[in-house]
Image (spheres, helix red, strand yellow):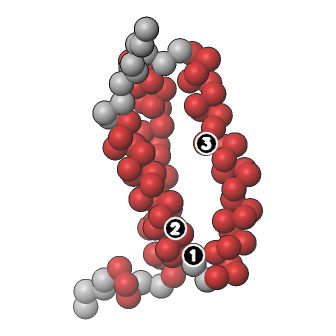
Amino acid sequence: MQRSFANLSPYWRGSLYYMAFWSIIGIFAPFVNLRWLEIGVTQQQIGTLSAFGPFMAMTLAPFVSRLADHRAWHQPLLAVALGSTGVALFMLGFARISRGC
């Protein structure tokens, strides 16, 4: 009997999601700072950019979690978060620093 993802228990679906999410983060995270150096971002700017993600997670997570609990939007908000992370990583491949006047 073949089991599809939809037929898995919530425990297994959540486990597979976290495995996939943190695997992708683990693959990309070590190289993001190198990419920023490659396109000309200064070390100070890299420090600021690196601190931005954890800061936003710390400040927004309680509000987004409350919204998800109150409206029962757990899956849609999770999909938006995963999709926006993917889009941001994809767009990083096209990033260039403009050296203006």
* Residue 34 in view: no
* Residue at 47 percent of width and 64 percent of height: 80
Q: Which mark is residue 53?
A: 3
Find out whether the residues at labels 2 and 1 contact each other: C-beta distance under 8 Å. yes
The amino acid on which the numbered mark 2 sits, given as a three-letter code, is Leu
Residue 62, can we see it?
A: yes
> What amino acid does circle 1 point to?
His
**Mark 2, other Cα within 10 Å: few <14 / some 14–19 / many ≥20:** few
Vertical placement of residue 101 versus 2, above or below: above
Where is the N terminus found, in terms of image quarters? bottom left
Q: Residue at x 45, y 55 (%)?
A: 84
Q: Classify mark 3: helix, strand or loop.
A: helix
Q: Of label 1 and label 3, which has the lower sequence position? A: 3
Q: How many numbered circles are shown? A: 3
Q: Residue at x 57, y 76 (%)?
A: 74
Q: Position of residue 2 (x, y in %)?
A: 25, 86
* Amino acid, disc 3: Gly
Q: Earlier in the sequence, mark 2 or mark 3?
A: 3
Taking the spot 72% from the left edge, 50% from the top edge, the residue there is 58
Q: Secondary structure at mark 2?
A: helix
Density class for disc 1 (Cα within 10 Å; few <14, some 14-19, many ≥20) is some
Above or below, comparing residue 31 to residue 23 in the picture: above
Image quarter hosting the C terminus = top left
Instruction: In the rendered structure, find residue 23 and report the number of the disc placed on it.
Output: none
**Picture coordinates of residue 78 (x, y %)?**
52, 67
Residue tagged 2: 78
Q: Is residue 54 above or below residue 51?
A: below
Q: CA distance from mark 1 to mark 3?
A: 21 Å
Q: Position of residue 93 (x, y in %)?
A: 32, 34
Q: Which residue is mark 1?
A: 74
